[in-house]
Image: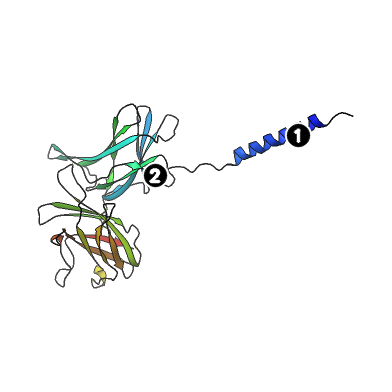
């Protein structure tokens, strides 16, 4: 009788090979790093592709979270780069050219999107026939720095029932810029409120203002200008933004009236709502 050992060994080998193949193909695909993001602009430089991305697919006046992705020739995200940026608007005014920037953060690796770099830009003007924006990216993947200018379109965020950015000259002669970060989607009741506060030092310097207070007073203009409970004035957090709460007692159109006070309690811009003053000189608008 012939031994069955060789046949048994062959069958066991085939079974082990098949099991290995199943394990290899059954592993789930890695999630797409840019899932839920839209490419706003892209350029090719030095054999690499550089992309600007965000969640909405548009940029507007006010606070804009933006992501940067650098892809190699194989389409893989480069994760060991050093990346910086600078937004700049070029304006043609009566035949002469003028440039200015706006508040913006640095860039750091994103905690939510692998292989992407994250920051924000607070655009202070919309693109127009006489003014255009560029984001200049400076990156280094190990061979020295390279710079690429990416043109971007910035839309207005100010309408009859919506306003997420405002600015004003303070009594101290400084221009202050305020950008609402939250609530992005207001609801009835008490909402977390987050605002960026900056000042203009020059056309290219807009640092974060530290140690101030932003007072909030939401009012409903179409309903007798009534207010709502639950408001907490904004103070600065460890992230540099100003945090507090704003209350909305019902759905509809609201103005969030603002006052900016320095560290001594002196009001620098904005004014209280009174019987003769139905709104502050600086405010945001929401409609939901």
Q: Residue at x 83, y 32 (%)?
A: 4
Locate residue 196, reporting x and y percent: 25, 53
Q: Is residue 208 left or right of residue 80?
A: left
Quarter holding residue 191? bottom left
Quarter holding residue 129? top left
Q: Nearer the viewer, residue 281 or 91?
A: 281
Q: Which residue is mark 1?
A: 11
Q: Is residue 61 above or below residue 4?
A: below
Label 2–label 1 contact, CB within 8 A: no
Q: Secondary structure at mark 2?
A: strand
Q: Is residue 217 above or below residue 79?
A: below
Locate residue 184, reporting x and y percent: 33, 57
Locate residue 52, reporting x and y percent: 34, 40
Q: Is residue 176 above or below residue 233?
A: above
Q: Residue at x 31, y 57 (%)?
A: 182
Q: Residues within 10 Å of mark 1 (few under 14, many from 20)?
A: few
Q: Secondary structure at mark 1?
A: helix
Disc with the residue nearer the chain's start (2 vs 1):
1
Which is closer to the viewer, label 2 or label 1?
Answer: 1
- The colour scheme of the drawn protein is rainbow
């Amino acid at each position: 009788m012939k031994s069955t050992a060789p046949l048994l060994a062959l069958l066991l080998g085939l079974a082990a090979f098949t099991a290995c193949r199943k394990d290899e193909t059954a592993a789930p695909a890695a999630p797409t790093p840019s899932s839920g993001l839209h490419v706003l602009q892209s350029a090719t430089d030095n054999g690499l592709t550089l992309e600007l991305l965000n969640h909405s697919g548009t940029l507007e006046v006010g606070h804009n979270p933006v992501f940067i992705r650098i892809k190699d020739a194989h389409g893989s995200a480069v994760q060991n780069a050093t990346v910086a940026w600078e937004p700049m608007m070029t304006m043609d005014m009566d035949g002469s050219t003028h440039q200015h920037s706006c508040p913006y953060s640095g860039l750091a690796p994103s905690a939510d999107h692998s292989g992407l770099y994250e920051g924000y830009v607070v655009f202070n003007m919309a693109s127009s026939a006489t003014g255009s924006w560029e984001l200049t990216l400076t990156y280094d993947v190990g061979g020295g720095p390279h710079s690429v200018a990416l043109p971007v379109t910035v839309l207005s965020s100010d309408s009859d029932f919506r306003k997420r950015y405002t600015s004003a000259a303070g009594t101290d002669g400084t221009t202050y810029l305020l950008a609402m970060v939250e609530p992005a989607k207001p609801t009835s009741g008490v909402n977390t409120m987050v605002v960026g506060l900056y000042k203009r030092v020059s056309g290219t310097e807009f640092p974060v203002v530290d140690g101030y207070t932003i007072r909030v007073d939401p009012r409903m203009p179409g309903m007798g200008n009534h207010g709502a409970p639950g408001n907490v004035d904004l103070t600065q957090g460890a992230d540099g933004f100003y945090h507090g709460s704003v209350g909305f007692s019902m759905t509809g159109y609201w103005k969030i009236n603002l006052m900016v006070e320095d560290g001594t309690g002196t009001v620098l811009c904005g004014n209280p709502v009174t019987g003769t003053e139905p709104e502050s000189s600086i405010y945001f608008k929401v409609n939901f």
